[in-house]
Amino acid sequence: MKNIYQDILHAVANKKRLLAVLLDPDKLSINQIPEIASKINRSIVTHILVGGSIIEESVMDPFVIELKKQTELPIVIFPGDITQISNHADGLLFLSLISGRNPEFLIEKQVQSVSKLRGSNLEVIPTGYLLIENGKETAVQRVSQTNPMSRGNTSLIVDTAKAGELLGMKLIYLEAGSGATHPINREIISKVKADLNMPLIVGGGISNKKQLDTAYTAGADMVVIGTAFEQNDAFFNELI
């Protein structure tokens, strides 16, 4: 069994850069998995996240099962709802949207998920999730009915991330959203990382190697990329 969180800690301690690809079953069919998995396996990607804002329950299990056939990389559920929990994956980011104040996504969805997770083989990793303003409305914003945090209020973002750590979260995830106009900037990443004693994930709007390197040098331990990896061959070629 993969020990995902301990492997992340070990990588961080050894200053190894981690890269995750987020696959959304709403946007990819099962028939496309062999091709995308082949690209992932030829790249420097270290983890695969699976999830999205709106996915039918019947889609998730077959998607993960087929993906497991095509790769040895750890597959971690990045759930938009409890319907996306699949016991066929290796782990689950147990997200709490601590940037918002909608109790449904702070704690209610988590409570509802317990009956599915009790007795599950998934490695459950508590994760504080912060949605950061990126220049356009995101699916997370619409579904959660919460506003993103202002890019200009770095101190509040830092305090919110630290509150997540003090609450016992094991990871902090700074999210600009899928297809973000602006990735999370260097100042936010560096100041959040400097105040944390835990791994930091950064995702959203990263579509080229320069933006990827900026996130790493600012302090991201894991960077998450999505559509750019699938659609931008030039970016993919830089990640081989």
Image (spheres, rainbow, N blue to C red):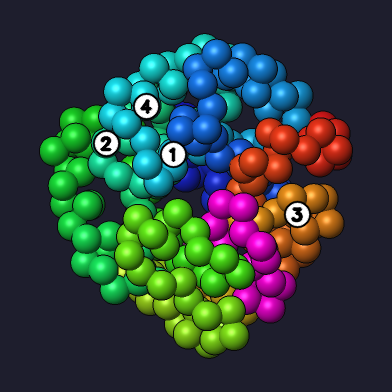
Point out the tag, 3 or 1, that comes first from the N-terminus. Answer: 1
3D distance between C-alphas at marks 4 and 2: 8 Å
Viewer-nearest residue: 154 or 3: 154
Q: Between marks 4 and 1, how big is the CA–CA gap?
A: 8 Å
Q: State yes or no: residue 70 in magenta.
A: no
x and y, in percent, of residue 135 in the image: 61, 69
Q: In the drawing, does residue 224 fall left or right of residue 217?
A: left
Q: Quick check: marks 4 and 3 in contact, CB under 8 Å?
A: no
Answer whether labels 4 and 2 touch (C-beta < 8 Å): yes
Q: In terms of depth relative to the viewer, which is nearer, 76 or 54?
A: 54
Q: Is residue 64 visible?
A: yes
Mark 4 or 2, nearer chain start: 4
- The Cα atoms of the two marked residues, 2 and 1, are separated by 10 Å
Q: Name the residue carrying label 4.
A: 60
Specify the amino acid type for callout 1.
Gly
Residue 116 position by quadrant: top left
The amino acid marked with disc number 3 is Leu
Task: Please say if 156 is above or below 145.
Answer: below
Q: Which one is earlier in the sequence, the residue at label 2 or at label 1?
A: 1
Judging by the rendered image, the residue that carries numbered circle 3 is 212
Secondary structure beneath dot 3 equals helix
Q: Within 10 Å of the Cα at label 3, are there few (<14), some (14-19), or many (20+) other Cα atoms?
A: many
Between disc 2 and disc 3, the foreground one is: 2
Question: Dots 3 and 1: beta carbons under 8 Å?
Answer: no
